[in-house]
Image (tube, rainbow, N blue to C red):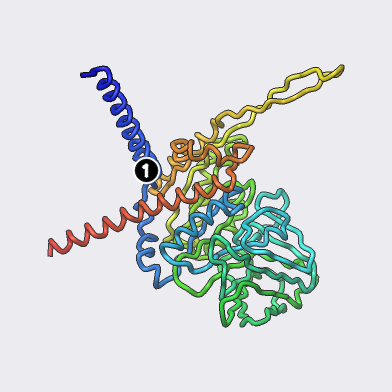
Amino acid sequence: MNTGWHNNLKWKLAAVLSLLLLAGTATYAQQKVNNIEQDTALYNVFDSFTVADSKVISIVHLGDSHVQAGYFPLATASLLQQEFGSAGRGYVFPYNLAGTNGPEDFKWNTTSRWQTERVVDRYKSPYLGPGGIALISQNDAPTISVTAKPDAPMDNNFRRVKLLYDAGNSNNSLIAPDANVTISPVDGAGSPTLNVATLEFPQTEQTFQARWEGTGSGPFRFYGAVMENGNNGILYNSIGINGAMYQQYNEISNTLLTQMAVLQPQLVIISLGTNEAYGKLDPLAFRNEIDKAVTLIRERNPNVNILLTTPPDCMRAVKTPHRRKVGKRWRTYYTTRYYPNPYISMVTQQIMGYAREHGIACWNFNAVNKSQKDRFADGWAPDHIHFNVKGYQLQGQLLYQALEQSYTHYLQQVKKNSLTSNVQH
């Protein structure tokens, strides 16, 4: 009997079993990390999910550059709509006309000249609409047109379009071919002349044109549109501004108030905190800004569910100079190394601490990002602050999985309570 061979086989089997156990443990650990704390705070919107086939469930996802690009929120939105039905594309803005990046599933065109204002600008109007961004024209007959691109990750067909604008007077009119147009003011949005023009189309469309007349010498302000397809299900409104922080959305409080008035969400997801971690961070002041945002949102919509998320595990870039002689001349070169940003942890702690103190749901993506660093290894952009497309899509999938896990737990609780009630009776 070859005991050496048997011993080797035994060790190999033990090694394989250990690897399988570690893999299973890692998967279980990832599932445990990728959850939503205080998820009972989402039970109202989960209750709506159970009847999503008979109503429209509006969700607002508010954030910074991680959200503006669209890859992160659209990944979550498309998965939610696959499960609960699609009520349409939701809020959209002509970022290309504003000269910045944004979701690429619509192409906007215009014959007018526009300027742009954002919540992050030093000099800006006190009214920036629900997206925290506005196009401004001095043209007395501004025009826009939009075409939905095929093969988009989300259903971007529409039968109803709500255009949000401020003409500065009540004497203007709107012409939109093939659409029935109804114009009404937006109450509680902070601006006395903010209007919503609802365009109703007889059939599903992928393009439309709009032309305003009688707007005078301006300024005419366009705040974006809400695309609906006429079906029930999830209406996911993605709103992000590059460089945005809690403080800036709070300064232009009409932005948050308009979001609640126009979009009427049952759930608000807030993904902010990255930019605060790259400035002078005062933890207490930051926590107060979170509270201001939550208070403003609930001022207009007291029954809304809120989900706070923590930022990615971003890095700080440190460039080290070194000189090298090239021929007869010395040249300076730089080596870039990336180190953990300690302020990211401070921001994460404040978001989680505030959520626990006030019983608000919180998705600690920072911990998820760390626990699944191998999956995100090729998902970072070169600056190690943002993700590339793959990274953002993975982040969106993980948020959906966390929501789905909490929703499943909610259904189990409902079933358990129902059984208990039947036994008692």
Extreme residue in the front direction: 1
Nearer-the-camera pick, 221 or 285: 221
SS state under label 1: helix
Residue at figure coordinates x 32%, y 30% from the top left: 16
Position of residue 295 in the picture relative to residue 321 (left or right): left
The image position of residue 321, as x and y in percent, is 72, 22
Report which quarter residue 421 is drawn in.
bottom left
Question: Of the residues shown, which amino acid type is indicated by label 1?
Answer: Gln
The residue nearer to you, when weighing 68 against 83, is 83
Q: Position of residue 376 (x, y in %)?
A: 51, 40
Q: Label 1: how many residues lie within 10 Å, few (<14), some (14-19) or many (20+)?
A: some
Tell me: 276 left or right of 10: right
Looking at the image, residue 5 lies above or below residue 301 = above
Quarter that holds the C terminus = bottom left
Residue at numbered disc 1: 31
> Can residue 364 be seen by looking at this rendering?
yes
> Which residue is at a point 74% across and 63% down the rendered structure image?
136
Which residue is more in the foreground, 150 or 214? 150
Q: Position of residue 393 (x, y in %)?
A: 52, 50
Identify the residue shown where x is 63% and y is 58%. 104
Q: Is residue 111 above or below residue 43?
A: below
Quadrant housing residue 332 = top right
| Quadrant in the picture for the N terminus | top left
| Rendered location of residue 358, percent (x, y) | 40, 47
Query: Vertical placement of 203 versus 407: above or below?
Result: below
**Residue 247 visible in the displayed image:** no
